[in-house]
Image (cartoon, rainbow, N blue to C red):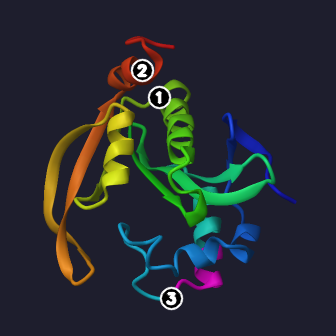
Amino acid sequence: MTAPPFLKGADIHLRALQESDCQGAYLQWFNDAEVCRFNGHHLFPYQREEAEAYVRKVELSPSDLVLAIVLTAGDRHIGNVSLQNINLVHRSAEFAIVLGEKEIWGKGYSKQAARLILNHGFLTLNLQRVECGTAETNIPMQRLAESLGMQKEGCRRQALFRENRYLDIVEYGVLKEEYLRKCHGTGGAH
């Protein structure tokens, strides 16, 4: 049985990641060099047991909110989005996203998923800050970060080895007030 929608958007919804997802295309994503071009995966083969263990771990984690991105039409799991390392003292988290189904790249689903989870992070979890890092060559992720009001905050030099070279990781961050102003047209609570 599929988990019910947790956060609903126009074309997608976000739901809990579940072990049954490990039977579908999910494993293929993390074994695909193109999908993993800008992340830390695709170093070793990703096995079903490893995926299932990860799902069980995040189901119980009080500091990681990992959700499946699902096309509402057809109920198709196309990626994952998360707020990880949620720190309730500092009110901060790290944003991450992966769209595994390549034929849907560039259709706006990443932005919808990102806004759903950041809205939840800022307006429900009461986070003050969300950050992310991406490879210097990952222009789509940099554009997504900037569309969410994130600002470049720094660079981890030569921190990622991809395609036989070291790449810098560009660090982004957004404060609650900045996100609300950019994505909701307001600077205060919404």
Q: Secondary structure at mark 2?
A: helix
Residue 167 % position (x, y): 19, 69
Report which residue position mark 3 lands on.
Answer: 45
Q: Quadrant of residue 150?
A: top left
> Is residue 49 rendered magenta in the image?
yes
Cα distance, mark 1 to mark 3?
A: 35 Å
Q: Secondary structure at mark 1?
A: helix
Query: Please, what is the three-letter code of the amino acid marked with disc 1?
Result: Phe
- Callout 2 touching callout 1 (CB < 8 Å): yes
Residue 27 % position (x, y): 61, 77
Residue reaching furthest to the left: 157
Report which residue position mark 1 lands on.
Answer: 122
Between residues 127 and 22, which one lies in front from this camera angle?
Answer: 22
> Is residue 109 rendered magenta in the image?
no
Packing grade of label 1 (10 A; few <14, some 14-19, many >=20) is many
N-terminal label among 1 and 3: 3
N-terminal label among 2 and 3: 3
Residue reaching furthest to the right: 1
Report which residue position mark 2 lands on.
Answer: 180
The segment highlighted magenta reads 46-52
Query: Please, what is the three-letter code of the amino acid marked with disc 3?
Result: Pro
Q: Quadrant of residue 188?
A: top left
Packing grade of label 3 (10 A; few <14, some 14-19, many >=20) is few
